[in-house]
Amino acid sequence: MNARLTRRHFVGGLALMGVATPRAWAQGFAGLGRDADGFASVIPGRALTFPADHGPHPEFRIEWWYLTANLIDASGNAYGAQWTLFRQAMAPSTQDHGWATPQVWMGHAGITSATAHHAAETFARGGIGQAGVTATPFRAWIDAWDTRGLDGFSDMNVAPLEVSASAENFNYRLRLDAKQPLVLQGDAGYSRKSERGQASYYYSQPYFTAAGTLAIDGKDIAVTGRAWMDREYSSQPLASDQTGWDWFSLHLPNDEKLMLFRLRQKDGSHYFAGNWITADGKSAPLPTDAIAMAPMAITDVAGRKVPTAWRIAIQSRALQIETTPLNAQSWMATTFSYWEGPVRFTGSHSGVGYLEMTGY
């Protein structure tokens, strides 16, 4: 039997669950608003523990290990790199070995410049060694795409790491270092996604410095910059009437960080959340009514109307900024397609970051 899980088989399996059907798209982006009967629940007050929580949680339906990097070359040209590994449970079960496992894995990788955006996608069946995550020593992989801890790895810093991916017309290999520990998002790692109880466990490492090489169409480019890792796991991260999200990770001046998102609801009463992270690692949740996000410009992307420039205000933090994309055509034409790319911002604060938008 061929161990490789093809895109056709992966999507077919999701269809059996209702995830790839029109009905599922009515249950939140990519079916993430479906009922979670039989899966573990996200509850407030659970303490996250490390290194254990760097590893997989098969009792929950979905989780991801998500890395984005804002990079520049020696001439100051900007680039973005993305590396993501998703785990999806097709049914409630903790069986994680062999072909009996319900766990499937999906990897996304991307490279963005001012003139081009490249994306790649790969799939794997869990339990047979083609993809997976180990907490100690830390390693996340799918096929030849790899994120692994290097000598001197710190469980609390999630560093140093080496991240690599390759596709037909791009590849990259980056080293990520961090002097600061990871931070908990939401309320001590409990990240609420609606007023009706949907939530995830969520933590980040926003302090990475990055250095390495990327190649686009066969041209090697040495780069340095900043990177950000997000870790989330949940069984029902969206409400059934939430159609998608607009999510920012921003590197502010003086090494402060900002994570914020808007979850779009069909009735227009969108849900906002975020965390302000200080240079010394203190992560404070922002009240929902303290966040103002409004699109400034709409771009035609892959036959869709996508808001690619934004105005963001957080009055309690004296922040008023406007964001612009490095490349407005940063569309991930993957099975569940979305916009993902580097941005820069100006105003009361200036810097760079990443924007992800789903459900358009």
Image (cartoon, rainbow, N blue to C red):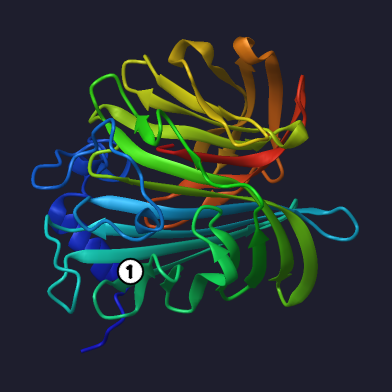
Drawn side of residue 169 relative to residue 348, left or right: left
Q: In this view of the protein, which residue sits in the foreground, 322 or 61? A: 61
Query: Pointer 1: what residue?
Result: 7
Q: Quadrant of the N terminus?
A: bottom left
Q: Quadrant of the C terminus?
A: top left
Residue at 63% across, 25% down:
310
How far across and how far down the image is residue 125, in percent? 27, 73
Residue at 45% across, 43% down:
203
How far across and how far down the image is residue 145, in percent? 50, 73
- Crowd band around label 1 with a 10 angstrom C-alpha radius: few (<14), some (14–19), many (20+): some
Name the residue furthest bottom.
1
Amino acid type of the residue tagged 1 in the rendering: Arg
How far across and how far down the image is residue 206, in percent? 60, 44
Residue at 72% across, 44% down:
326
**Is residue 224 depicted above or below 187 in this figure?**
below
Asked whether the viewer can see residue 164, the reply is no
Drawn side of residue 102 relative to residue 296, left or right: left
